């Protein structure tokens, strides 16, 4: 901001020096026939004022654009942080808390379950299956936000990435049995955050 005003006063100083120099020169040169020194000096001063009337608005428009761009960048950074925070907060939503509780219960039993037993357990329990789908739907929203650049991926990966990797690996046998189009997004996020 300081540079803006230093440059502004430098432009004014150059303008004053230029106007004074040309005015001095016109006083030392004989005026054209039918004119006087007063008329010539008046024409020069008006010409210089017109030039200043073009230069200064252009100068301030350039600085306004620079300052507006800085404000836009700050706003985008704020929105990015806010969107990231909103996604992290949604992880603690009541419906996801219940789904996560059921998933944690399976996580405790997972080592003792074969892949086929896990699949049968999920297929036989609609509440558990819906919980898993809810968790993966949440992470699909995360993936879309990451790909669109709406969030800070590094923060999300640090906050909820580890949990996603565990959940994905926990349910991988079940995921492989689902229609590929449905869970391709999860695989993309898994490979990205692994």
Image (tube, grey):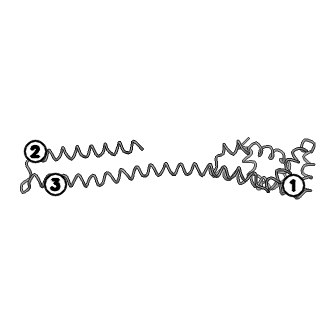
Q: Name the residue beneath numbered marker 2.
A: 28
Instruction: Characterize the local packing of mark 1: few (<14), some (14-19) or many (20 or more) Cα atoms within 10 angstroms.
Output: many
Instruction: Characterize the local packing of mark 3: few (<14), some (14-19) or many (20 or more) Cα atoms within 10 angstroms.
Output: few
Whether 133 is drawn above or below 157: the answer is below
Secondary structure beneath label 1: helix
Q: Name the residue beneath numbered marker 3.
A: 42
Look at the image and tell me in which quarter the C terminus lies.
Answer: top right
Q: Distance between the residues labelled 2 and 3?
A: 15 Å
**Percent position (x, y) of residue 107?**
87, 45
Query: Which residue is located at x 88 percent, y 48 percent?
Result: 105
Which mark is on residue 20? none
Query: Which residue is located at x 8 percent, y 55 percent?
Result: 35
**Percent position (x, y) of residue 4?**
38, 45
**Percent position (x, y) of residue 132?**
82, 53
Of 117 and 57, nearer the camera is: 57
Q: Distance between the residues labelled 1 and 2?
A: 97 Å
Query: Which residue is located at x 77 percent, y 44 percent?
Result: 163
Marked residue nearer the N-terminal end (3 or 1): 3
Which mark is on residue 128? 1
Which of discs 3 and 1 lies nearer the camera? The answer is 3
Secondary structure beneath label 2: helix
Marked residue nearer the N-terminal end (2 or 3): 2
Q: In this view, does 72 lie to the left or right of 105?
A: left
**Percent position (x, y) of residue 17?**
23, 43
Marked residue nearer the N-terminal end (1 or 2): 2
Instruction: Characterize the local packing of mark 2: few (<14), some (14-19) or many (20 or more) Cα atoms within 10 angstroms.
Output: few
Query: Which residue is located at x 23 percent, y 51 percent?
Result: 48
Q: In this view, does 49 lie to the left or right of 187?
A: left
Total number of numbered labels? 3
Secondary structure beneath label 3: helix
**CB contact under 8 Å: marks 3 and 1:** no
């Amino acid at each position: 901001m300081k540079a803006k005003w230093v440059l502004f006063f430098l432009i004014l100083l150059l303008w004053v020096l230029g106007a004074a120099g040309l005015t001095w020169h016109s006083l030392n040169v004989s005026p054209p026939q039918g004119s006087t020194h007063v008329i010539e000096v008046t024409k020069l001063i008006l010409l210089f004022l017109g030039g200043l009337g073009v230069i200064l608005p252009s100068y301030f428009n350039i600085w306004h654009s620079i300052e507006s761009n800085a404000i836009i960048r700050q706003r985008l950074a704020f929105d990015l942080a806010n969107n990231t925070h909103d996604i992290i907060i949604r992880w603690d939503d009541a419906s996801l808390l219940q789904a996560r509780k059921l998933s944690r219960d399976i996580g405790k039993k997972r080592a003792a379950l074969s892949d086929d037993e896990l699949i049968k357990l999920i297929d036989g329990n609609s509440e558990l299956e819906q919980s898993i789908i809810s968790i993966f739907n949440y992470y699909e929203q995360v993936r879309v936000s990451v790909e669109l650049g709406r969030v800070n991926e590094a923060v999300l990966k640090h906050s909820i990435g580890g949990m996603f990797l565990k959940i994905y690996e926990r349910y991988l046998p079940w995921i492989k049995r689902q229609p590929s189009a449905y869970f391709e997004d999860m695989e993309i996020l898994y490979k990205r955050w692994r």
